[in-house]
Image (spheres, rainbow, N blue to C red):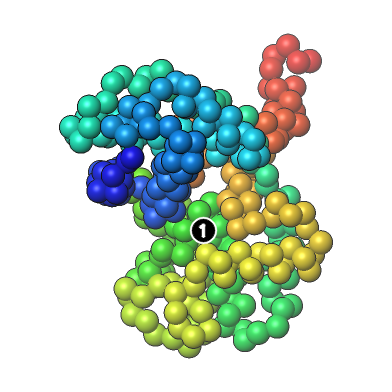
Amino acid sequence: MIAATHRKAWLDWLSIEKRYGDNTLSAYGSDLDDFCTFIRNSGTSTVTNYAMSRLEIRAWLADMAARGLARTTIARRVSSLRSFYRFCGQTGLANIDDINWLKAPRPPLAVPKSVSHDDALAMLSAIFTRRGPDWSKKRDFGLLMLLYGVGLRISEALSLKQGDAPLVNWLRITGKGGKIREVPVLPAVTKAINDYLAVCPFDVGNDGALFVTNRGNPYGPRAAQRLVEGLRHELGLPTHVTPHALRHAFATHLLGNGGDLRAIQELLGHASLSTTQRYTSIDEAHLKRVHNQTHPRAR
């Protein structure tokens, strides 16, 4: 069976060399554990020395499908297993044969679920009608402004330090895989953050978290999710409205107003343009309108 020391060495390599985030590392570790659990429960022993057959892999895939796992989850678990085996082979931890035959199932094309312009504005306005101290309302407003006005991931917004403010015109962000990008900041976003800091009752220093709870602790992702859930229920918005949906709204609204796809890719920090291209399917009406207005044969 797969040794715990090899599992740890692989996760350490993903963390240090690949600079994967904690959530990704946790998911990859769980993926490998799922495979080990299946092999152990199936009673097969051929994986003892890291040898695996195609029959075992097919059985594992069938088992995951029978459990009702999404194709995206199955694809990630196969990718995790392939990564582990390649790591063991390249580092000499085990004698691994070529595993190029191991392919992940192609996940369905996922179209990001966004928030309409009116709903995004309604969420921002509704913050100030909720219960709670004024300073915490300005904190929540500033946080959502970063998601919708700058297109940050929730993890990126919550990782900001008080020393990062005032945001001025540009903000340096460390995204997935340790990739650094600089994004422009709208004056309205800068004002929202400065208004929050002017009334925040906690002085945590430049190295302290930009967003803090009512006890002065760093504001966590679950708190942000609860904030959006509350606004969603109050306004009767669909269930797909999450903090990340505001980032999708940032991209789709830029695209809908004529934004360049390559520029949006840089703003979002996507490694591949194909990831950004998913947003084009959301606003087909705009693309048709641009085509009809600009193509010389349209008239």
The number of callouts visible is 1
Q: Quarter holding the N terminus? A: top left
Q: Quadrant of residue 292?
A: top right
Dot 1 corresponds to which residue?
A: 154
- Seen in the picture, residue 178 relative to 200 is either above or below; the reply is above
Q: Residues within 10 Å of mark 1 (few under 14, many from 20)?
A: many
Q: In the structure shown, which secondary structural element does the residue marked by tag 1 occupy?
A: helix
- Seen in the picture, residue 122 relative to 32 is either above or below; the reply is below
Q: Quarter holding the C terminus? A: top right
Q: Residue at x 64, y 56 (%)?
A: 242
Q: Residue 115: where, in percent of width, then height?
A: 70, 51
Q: Residue furthest front?
A: 43
Q: Give the camera-side residue of 16 and 105.
A: 105
Q: Residue 41: where, in percent of width, then height?
A: 49, 41
Q: Is residue 135 visible?
A: yes
- Seen in the picture, residue 80 relative to 171 is either above or below; the reply is above
- Left/right placement of residue 157 relative to residue 173 reads right
- Left/right placement of residue 227 relative to residue 48 reads right
Q: Residue 164: where, in percent of width, then height?
A: 37, 67
Q: Residue at x 71, y 69 (%)?
A: 230
Q: Give the camera-side residue of 184 and 177.
A: 177
- Left/right placement of residue 209 relative to residue 65 reads left
Q: Residue at x 76, y 15 (%)?
A: 298
Kind of residue at badge 1: Ile
Q: Quadrant of residue 133?
A: bottom right
Q: Residue at x 70, y 83 (%)?
A: 131
Q: Residue 212: where, in percent of width, then height?
A: 48, 77
Q: Residue furthest left?
A: 92
